[in-house]
Structure formats: structure tokens, C-alpha cells
Image: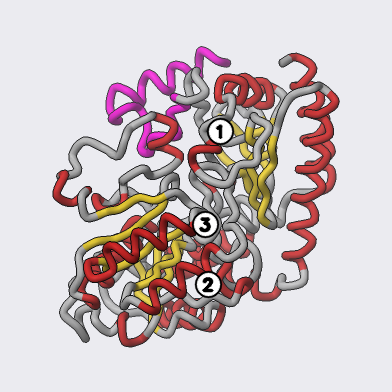
């Protein structure tokens, strides 16, 4: 069976750069060859040898309804029969945009893209065009896709591989991006004081998800809003992971902080490639064709992604009462796992925000990249592989988030805890 899988990666490596189309999939930080997936259903994912796993990666977050949700699949099939792309407006795009604007009040206008990277790239370009300034601030360990300006100290894939940014990014551009410690209010105050006249934007994951889950400290995001408002700086919330993950809307709704621009992705596409940037009307109207900031995309707002997204958002809207139970389920799972670890005398620190979580292999607390990096990544790698043998699919990196879906059952929780207990005995 393993041989069959090694064959698959060997074959892939002959034709795909690195054998994968996105680096974390190559398992470099946990070792071994990646397992190839054949199909998935609900909370389960199946490899090409038909082995079954309970999935806590969920395609890195989008599959909040579980895999192959029948209503989503039906919507995609119906849309496909009418044609997959027209390069012309469709009513579905308006419906999708309406759902987003309804759910997130700070979004007065929205523009669909085909990836989260395109959304953040557009947000940065918009902020620069709108303010006439060039510099941006991001935070260490926050990942906003792989556009040039944003790939500085950028979280999981990059953290895992130990790349200090990336070759191929001109120093001139890197010099326009200031990366500061997440959750550090003093350093952001100093930086804004010093650079305000040159700062176009501050971009932040309101809950960091790419150095593992790191929640914002009390007052951190509020301080960002105050500093940006006062200095004509565009505040951008990257809610690609958090949008529609905690309730029908963005994390911003829950904390009553209104950014100028918001980037979305993942869940809003129901598992199809999608992104969106939205926000204040006066900023968004600077986009072509109404304004002079150019952005375009042949497949932006394509019928398949829109149909999957509309159905997903409509189901989530009807599930408002279930979001708290999803968070409770995640809370129970994390607490039970913690007690299993402590019984074995293994240090673990759990960061959880509603239904996303990370088990850091260390004492903690983890509140920024520096503290996240204190984790025992070789121990995580061993845990990952034994959990996999025991039928549990976790992220192949210590510095990633785990997710629950509405398809996960209490039976899944029991199986996961049994697998965890069994795994810890062998570590």
C-alpha cells in the first residue's frame, strides 16, 4: 500500500514541480511522502488505497459543511450543465455579493476573485491607490497569500520551510513591507508614529491561522483601528480563514471592529477556487471600471464557484443556532486531548477560537510567532504520523490550524480521542 503511494508521489514529481501544487502538501516538515486522496464524504477523507481518515484539515478550512455536501454538489452539477464560464455577468454573482454584504456590514461593495491571494493583492493595490502612499505593515507569522508585498515573514508554508521571505521578491518591494510581532501594541504604535505619512495599509489576520491558531490579545485590533483611522491608513482584515467560520459573517462582527477592507476566500466558495475583496464604497469604487485602480480575472465570479458558494452560505445562514454547538464540540475535543497529553506528561498548549484550533507541542502560552516557534516540531511530526496510522488526518505542519465541520459527529470525537490515547502511548 505504501509502495503504491510512493509510486504516486514519484510519478507526480516527474511532471509537477516538487510533486505538489502547493508546498505544505509535500509533508516536508513531518517527513515521508504525502498520501494521495481519492475522495471524501462528510467528515471522512479516503486515500487512493481506500484507507479512511477523520479529517481535521478540511481542505485547509473551506469544507465547513463537510466534504461533498449533497446540496452543494447538486448546485455545482446544475450550474455545470448550463456552462462553466462565460466571461460575462451572471445573476449568480449578484446573489453571492448580496449574501456577503448582508452578512458583513462593513462590506458595502465587493469584487469576486479566484483566490485569496488575488483578494489580498487587490486590497493592497487599492489601499495604495486610494491613499497615494506606498508602505504597508503586516505581522510576523500572518500569511496573506503569496503576492510579492505580502510574502515577508509569512507563516506556515514559509515558517515550516524556514525561508526568510522568498527569493524572487525584489528588495525594493520588501523594503515597503514592515513586518511586526503579532499582538504587540507597543511596536505598532512606534511604527505608525514613525511611518504614518508613508503608510498605505495595515493588513492583519484578526485571528492568526498560519503560525497555528493565535487569537488577538484584548485591545490589539482596537488599537489598529484607532491608529489607522487617525492617520489615513487603510485597515485590511484578512478573513480568508475566519470569514463564515464562526457564525454567518466575519470575525469583525463578533468584536465590533470595522475594517476598511476585508478579504474573503475558502468557505465562501464551498470548496471551489474563490476569493473576494470588499469594503467601504468610496474605496471599492476606485477599482476599474468606476475608478483607476486596475484588477481583472477571466474566471472571477464563475458560475461553478458562485453556485457552490451561494448554497454554502445559504445553509450556514440557516444554521445560525448550530455555530455555538460546533464551538462546544471543538472545546470538548481540545480539553479531552489536553488531559490525555497531561496524563502522559507531554507538554501541550492548545489555542482555540470557536471551531479552529492548534495543539502546540510546548508549555505555552503562544501569542506570536516567536512563542509559536518554541514548539517541538519533531515530536509533532511523530504525533502526526502515528495519528495518521490510527485513522486521523491532521495538518502536516505544527504551524497550521485544525478545523471542525458540521459533518463531524460525537462518534468522530470518540474515535479521535481513542486514536490520540493510543498514539500518545507509543510516542
> Camera-side residue: 344 or 175?
175
Dot label at residue 241: 3
Dot label at residue 124: none
Q: Is residue 124 left or right of residue 360?
A: left
User: For the residue carrying disc 2, how many other residues have a C-alpha within 10 Å: few (<14), some (14-19), or many (20+)?
Assistant: many
**Residue drawn at 29 percent across, 60 percent down:** 136
Real-space CA distance between mark 3 and mark 2, rounded to the nearest whole angstrom:
17 Å
Name which of mark 1 and mark 2 comes first in the sequence: 2
Name which of mark 3 and mark 2 comes first in the sequence: 3
Residue bearing mark 1 = 398
Dot 2: element: helix
User: For the residue carrying disc 3, how many other residues have a C-alpha within 10 Å: few (<14), some (14-19), or many (20+)?
Assistant: many
- Start and end of the magenta stretch? 1-28
Give the quarter of the figure containing the C terminus. Answer: top right
Residue 372, placed above or below residue 68: above
| Residue 22 forms part of the magenta stretch | yes
Q: Is residue 183 left or right of residue 323?
A: left
Q: Magenta segment, principal secondary structure? A: helix
**Residue drawn at 55 percent across, 51 percent down:** 61
Between disc 3 and disc 2, the foreground one is: 3
Dot label at residue 310: 2
Real-space CA distance between mark 1 and mark 2, rounded to the nearest whole angstrom:
33 Å
Q: Quadrant of residue 103?
A: bottom right
Tell me whether circle 1 and circle 3 mark residues in contact (CB < 8 Å).
no
Could you say where residue 27 lies in the image, as x and y percent from the top left? Answer: 47, 27
**Residue drawn at 46 percent across, 17 percent down:** 6
Between disc 1 and disc 3, the foreground one is: 1
Residue 302, placed above or below residue 92: above
Amino acid at each position: 500500500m505504501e509502495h503504491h503511494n510512493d509510486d504516486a508521489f514519484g510519478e507526480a514529481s516527474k511532471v509537477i514541480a516538487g510533486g505538489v501544487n502547493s508546498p505544505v502538501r509535500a509533508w516536508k516538515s513531518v517527513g515521508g511522502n504525502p498520501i494521495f486522496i481519492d475522495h471524501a464524504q462528510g467528515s471522512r477523507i479516503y486515500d487512493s488505497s481506500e484507507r479512511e481518515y477523520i479529517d481535521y484539515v478540511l481542505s485547509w478550512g473551506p469544507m465547513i459543511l463537510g466534504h461533498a455536501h449533497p446540496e452543494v454538489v447538486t448546485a455545482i452539477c446544475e450550474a455545470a450543465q448550463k456552462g462553466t464560464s462565460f466571461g460575462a455577468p451572471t445573476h449568480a454573482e449578484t446573489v453571492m455579493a448580496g449574501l456577503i454584504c448582508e452578512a458583513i456590514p462593513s462590506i458595502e461593495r465587493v469584487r469576486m476573485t479566484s483566490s485569496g491571494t488575488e483578494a489580498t493583492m487587490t486590497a493592497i493595490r487599492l489601499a495604495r491607490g486610494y491613499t497615494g502612499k506606498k508602505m504597508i505593515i503586516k505581522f510576523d507569522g500572518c500569511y496573506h497569500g503569496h503576492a510579492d508585498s505580502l510574502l515577508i515573514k509569512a507563516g506556515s508554508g514559509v515558517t515550516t520551510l524556514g525561508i526568510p521571505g522568498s527569493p524572487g521578491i525584489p528588495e525594493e518591494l520588501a523594503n515597503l513591507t514592515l513586518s511586526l510581532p503579532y499582538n504587540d501594541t507597543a511596536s505598532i504604535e512606534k511604527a505608525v508614529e514613525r511611518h504614518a505619512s508613508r503608510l498605505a495599509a495595515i493588513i492583519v489576520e484578526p485571528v492568526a491561522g498560519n503560525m497555528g491558531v493565535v487569537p488577538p490579545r484584548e485591545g490589539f485590533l482596537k488599537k489598529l483601528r484607532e491608529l489607522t483611522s487617525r492617520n489615513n491608513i487603510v485597515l485590511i482584515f484578512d478573513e480568508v480563514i475566519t470569514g463564515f467560520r464562526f457564525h454567518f459573517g466575519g470575525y469583525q462582527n463578533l468584536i465590533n471592529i470595522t475594517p476598511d477592507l476585508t478579504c474573503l476566500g475558502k468557505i465562501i466558495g464551498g470548496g471551489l477556487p474563490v476569493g473576494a475583496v470588499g469594503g467601504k464604497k468610496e474605496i471599492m469604487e476606485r477599482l476599474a471600471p468606476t475608478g483607476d485602480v486596475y484588477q481583472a480575472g477571466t474566471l472571477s465570479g464563475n458560475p461553478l464557484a458562485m453556485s457552490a458558494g451561494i448554497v454554502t452560505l445559504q445553509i450556514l445562514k440557516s444554521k445560525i443556532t448550530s455555530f455555538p454547538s460546533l464551538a462546544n464540540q471543538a472545546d470538548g475535543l481540545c480539553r479531552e486531548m489536553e488531559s490525555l497529553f497531561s496524563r502522559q506528561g507531554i507538554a501541550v498548549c492548545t489555542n482555540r477560537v470557536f471551531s479552529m484550533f492548534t495543539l502546540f507541542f510546548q508549555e505555552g502560552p503562544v501569542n506570536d510567532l516567536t512563542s509559536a516557534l518554541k514548539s517541538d516540531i519533531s515530536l509533532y511530526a511523530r504525533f502526526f504520523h502515528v495519528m495518521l496510522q490510527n485513522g486521523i488526518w491532521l495538518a502536516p505542519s505544527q504551524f497550521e490550524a485544525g478545523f471542525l465541520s458540521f459533518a463531524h459527529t460525537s462518534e468522530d470525537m470518540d474515535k479521535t480521542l481513542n486514536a490520540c490515547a493510543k498514539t500518545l502511548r507509543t510516542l
